[in-house]
Amino acid sequence: MGIRSFKPTTNGLRHAQISDFKEITKSKPEKSLLRPLRGSGGRNCYGRITMRFRGGGHKRMYRLIDFKRDQIDQMAKVIAIEYDPNRSCRISLIEYPDKKRAYILAPLELKVGDEVISTVTADIEIRSGNCLPLSRIPLGTAVHNIELQPGKGGQMARSAGTSAQLMAKEGDFAHLRLPSGEVRKVKLNCRATIGQLGNVEHESISLGKAGRSHWLGRKAHIRGAAMNAHDHPHGGGEGKAPQGNPHPVTPWGKATKGLKTRRRRKYSDVFILRRRTK
């Protein structure tokens, strides 16, 4: 894993910094674990744009990731580390003794040839890639792919370089410090995978040009101040006019840029011990 920079033979390469993909061991994905993926272009079921500046991009196939890790007490061997265009972290192709294959999120230390296991009751080694209930994981351990409901599958800490730290166990709950700085209670019978996720240099990537962003399905983001008055509240005026509003707003007049949008009474409020810091 590392970052690759280029000799600036073109303007697009001058500031580009992308992954060197050295950890990838298999270039073609497992065909049985692929599913078609159709882009929405930011449109809902009625064809109306509900998320602006989305569309285009390279065609992708979805990789079926085993977030549940429900093959209990079966040792699996890592046979490849692969690139996944649908997420920032790498994925590992594992094979069980019955020759069944699955994709899991690839932790930092996991290598081809390593063995991983998912268990509920057995005492196993605390090693990257192993999946256990939080009740059986020692305090201070870094974990990822954390369940919020037992058996539902991992939902938290799934992007590149992230991990949560197990801070304490109290009653029926574990206290986890999440990558955002939030400390949250999660049930002890929820499962998590040991280790920090790989591709930690993802945050250092610099696309270098607008075209590379367009390849990812992100269209150009147009400022409201650059629009006409009937397209945006910040638009119109002569020359470089200021926004005019005392506070920045969305095209529909709602306050934005820093306005908190979390519901005042959300079901998960009782599980949050300390609010996020970033």
Image (cartoon, rainbow, N blue to C red):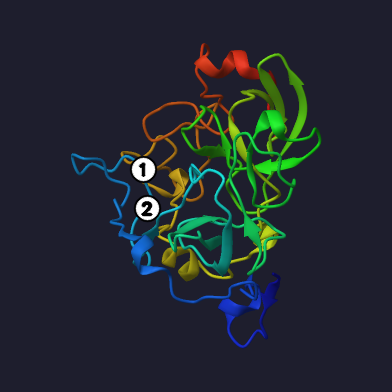
Examine the image and state in which quarter residue 156 appears: top right
Q: What's the amino acid at mark 1?
A: Met
Instruction: Give the image location of residue 37, x and y in percent.
Output: 31, 57
Mark linked to residue 54? 2
Q: In percent of the image, x 62 and y 39: which residue is there?
A: 192
Report whether residue 177 is seen.
no
Q: In percent of the image, x 31 and y 38: which residue is there?
A: 230
Q: Is residue 53 above or below residue 216?
A: above
- Per the image, the residue denoted by label 1 is 51
Q: In percent of the image, x 75 and y 22: which residue is there?
A: 169
Q: In percent of the image, x 68 and y 77: which residue is there?
A: 5
Q: Is residue 180 above or below residue 184?
A: below
Q: Secondary structure at mark 1?
A: loop
Q: Is residue 214 above or below residue 40?
A: below
Considering every residue shown, the one lying at the far bottom of the view is: 9
Contact, mark 2 vs mark 1 (Cβ under 8 Å): yes
Q: Nearer the viewer, residue 147 or 121?
A: 121
Instruction: Give the image location of residue 115, x and y in percent.
Output: 64, 59
Q: Is residue 127 above or below residue 137?
A: below
Instruction: Give the image location of residue 274, x and y in percent.
Output: 72, 21
Q: What's the amino acid at mark 2?
A: Arg
How many marks the image carries: the answer is 2
Q: Secondary structure at mark 2?
A: loop
- Neighbourhood count class around disc 2 (C-alpha, 10 Å): few under 14, some 14–19, many 20 upward: many
Quadrant containing the N terminus is bottom right
Report whether residue 11 is seen.
yes
